[in-house]
Each structure stands twice: as structure tokens, then as C-alpha cells.
Image: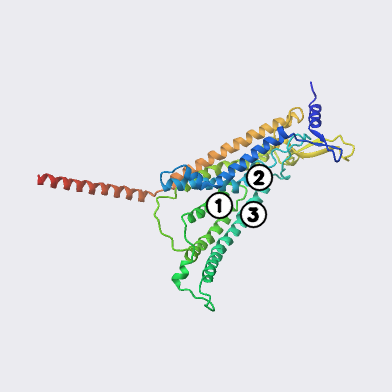
Amino acid sequence: MVDPKARLAANQKSKRKLNVVTRMEEPYVPFFKGKLPQIIISSSLVLLCISLVIAIYLTERELPRTAFEFDNSLTLKMFLFQFVNYYSSIFYIAFAKGRFVTRTGDVSKYFVEECPMGGCFVDLAIQLAIIMVGKQAFGAVMEIATPVFTRFYNKWKYTQNLDDKCEGPINLPQWEDDFLLSSWSPTSLFYEYLELVLQFGFVTLFVAAFPLAPLFALINNFFEIRFDAKKIITSFKRPVAQRVKSIGIWYRILDAMGKLSVITNAMIIAFTTSFVPRILHYIEYGSLNKYLDSTLFKRLVNDSDINTTFCVYTSNSYGQPPVPSIESAEEDQYFWHLMVARLAFVVLFENVIVLCTSLMRVLIPDVPKELRQQKRQHSYLTNELIMRQEFTISKKGINNN
């Protein structure tokens, strides 16, 4: 039987290449088996993202029957594009960062970014804090400044075309000054909805990592209402009011994000934080005194140039599954116990949330009972009036005959 360490050393040696400059062997990744597939995958994803940029053209190619269907299809494409742009880094930190780090010395594997000692939960909270505070503040400033500068630029450009004989400041009449305001396009309201939906995603999808997100969202929306009102009144021409039945596909998007948030928060608590490992360690050992030691793994070092006998790194029990014949059987067993505990927590968390939402739906109905009774009464009276009117018309027809 071949020794696993000998096979590992042979694989490392076969994946090394002599550098003609330094005359030293260096790790080598084959082009056709290693680099080319990754280049094809990355290029395909880039082309896919580029194709999503022309969302309007793709929507027109679908030949929607009505303007409502066109708006829904375009809205869904634009939201998915922005969803990838805004949430990809958050999902990477929460569920992918530090998950595929090799610690066994196998240079044939790709080295990826590793989480700090406390895990990626702190990095996730910092990322969300920067987005909810810094990005929202910057967006508010830009939303205030852009219409003001646009109005001044339009007025300056318009006055440049006036007669050069005019001296001093030009006081335009009110109707002419209003003509220079920006026009309210059909897509203007779309970006307002998109901003709120993206904010809703940051608040709900990752609230377990940053519980202060709803507070910052509330503060931002308090000022956002006043900023939007002033912008519409002072920087835009009066929009034409249009009556709509509902908010369209935005409702389904919000509903889908609300359901997805239950899964993401459960997985963040189970797989990104140390909540489940601590509970499992306390159940098995009765205390958390040796919890930190259980998260570390020691490996002997057979190198005379290093003044140490072993190195310490995060245990595989809290990351990827152990490598057979290299890690201990005890760690292998503990890893699968921990994985079962994490999955059980996700299932329990989802069931509790579903139970709570169902209870709230019963206690707080969408339509109050009094209003529902009034609607039924109005519907009954309307049917009665229609029947009486038809009876009167039919009776008159019989008498005339």
C-alpha cells in the first residue's frame, strides 16, 4: 500500500517546474488542465454580465404583449444584474471565504483568501457597516447634488445662447425657468424602487451579521423622503400622474427576498459564526474552557531551518472535511457531528420563522375584518341594484309588448 505522504510528495514534485532565471524549482500549474478551464469559465461569466447590460434590447426581443409585461421583464433583468453587483462580495465573505484553504502543503491546490482567527463573521459585519453607513451617505449626497448641478448647467447653457448684447445677470421669467427643469422619465421611479429594494436586501439577507442595519436604514429613509420630495418639486417638471393597480413585479421580488433571507440568516449563524460549534462543545464537554484549543490543529514540522517542532492552524473540524489517513479519526468524527448540528439548526431556524410568520399572518390579516365586511356589503348592495335595474327594464319591455 502506498504511503499517503509519499504520494503527496510525488504530486508536489510533478507539479513543479524549473525557473530558467532563478534556476530553482517553482510550483507550476499546467495551462490546458489548470489555467484554460478557469479562463473559459471566467470569460463566459464576463460575457454573460455584459449581455445583461443591454437589458432593454433583450426585452424587446421577447416581444411582450403589453407595456406592463415589458416593464416587469425589464425590471427583473435589471434587478438580477444589480443583485449580482451588490451582493456577490457579501455572499463570498459569508459562505465562500476561507472555505477552500489548503493546509497540508499540497501546492497543486489553489490558494484562496483565508478568514482571520475569529472567522469571517467580523469581516462580514465590517463590510455591511461600510455599505449601510458609507454607501448610503454617499448616495444621499449624490442624490441631492446631481439635480442641483444639472439645473445650474442647463440654465447656464441656455443663457449662453441668448443675445450677446445682454449685460449683467439675466432674470428669466418663471415659465422659462421651469422649462429648463429636468423631465420626469418613465424610468425615474424605477431607480427609486431599485434603491429601496437593494436596501431591503441588505437589511434582511444579512441582518444576523449586522443587527444595526435596520436602524441605519430607518435613519436613511427618514431623510430620503424629504430629499426626494424636494428633488421632485424643485428639480423636475411636474410629472403626469398615472394610476396603477399595484407595484408590479416588485412585490414578487420583495417576497422572494424575504423568503431567501430566512435561509441566508440561518446559514450565516450556522456556518459563519461559532454559535453552533460552541453549543456542541458545551453539550459534549459541559463547559467552554477548552473550546479555543479544540478549534486549533497541530502538525509536526520536519525542517531543520525552522526553530520549532510543530505549527498550529485552524482545525479541519470547523472547515472542510479532513483528509483520510492524514487527520485523526477523532477529528473526522467530530467534523460530521458538527455538520449534522449545523444542518439541524438551519432546519429548526426555518421552521420557527415559518411558524412565527404564519401566526402573525393570522393575528394581523392583510385586510381588517371591518373593512372586509364593508366590501362584502357593498358588493351585495351593488348586485341588488343591478338585479333591480334589470328587472325594471325587463318589466317595462313586457308591458310595452
Rounded to the nearest angstrom, the CA distance separating label 1 from label 2 is: 18 Å
Residue located beneath label 1 in the image: 199
Q: Quadrant of residue 282?
A: top right
Q: Secondary structure at mark 2?
A: helix
Q: Secondary structure at mark 1?
A: helix
The residue located at (20%, 48%) in the rendering is 389
Q: Is residue 327 above or below residue 67?
A: above
Labels 2 & 3 near each other (Cβ < 8 A): no
The residue located at (65%, 40%) in the rendering is 42
Q: Nearer the viewer, residue 26 or 56?
A: 56
| Residue 201 appears in the picture as rendered | yes
Query: Which percent across, then down, holds residue 45?
Result: 61, 41
The residue located at (46%, 48%) in the rendering is 71
Q: What amino acid does circle 2 point to?
A: Ile
Of callouts 3 and 1, the N-terminal one:
3
Q: Sort mark 2 into few (<14), some (14-19) or many (20+) by Cα contacts within 10 Å.
A: many
Q: How is the image coloured?
A: rainbow
Q: Quadrant of residue 319?
A: top right
Q: What amino acid does circle 3 point to?
A: Ile
Q: Secondary structure at mark 3?
A: helix
The N terminus sits in image quarter: top right
Of callouts 2 and 3, the N-terminal one:
2
Q: Nearer the viewer, residue 299 or 33?
A: 33
Q: What amino acid does circle 1 point to?
A: Gln
Rounded to the nearest angstrom, the CA distance separating label 3 from label 1 is: 13 Å
Residue located beneath label 2 in the image: 93
Q: Is residue 344 above or below residue 66?
A: above
The C terminus sits in image quarter: top left
| Residue 365 appears in the picture as rendered | no
Q: Residue furthest right?
A: 304
Rounded to the nearest angstrom, the CA distance separating label 2 from label 3 is: 14 Å
Q: Which mark is residue 130?
A: 3
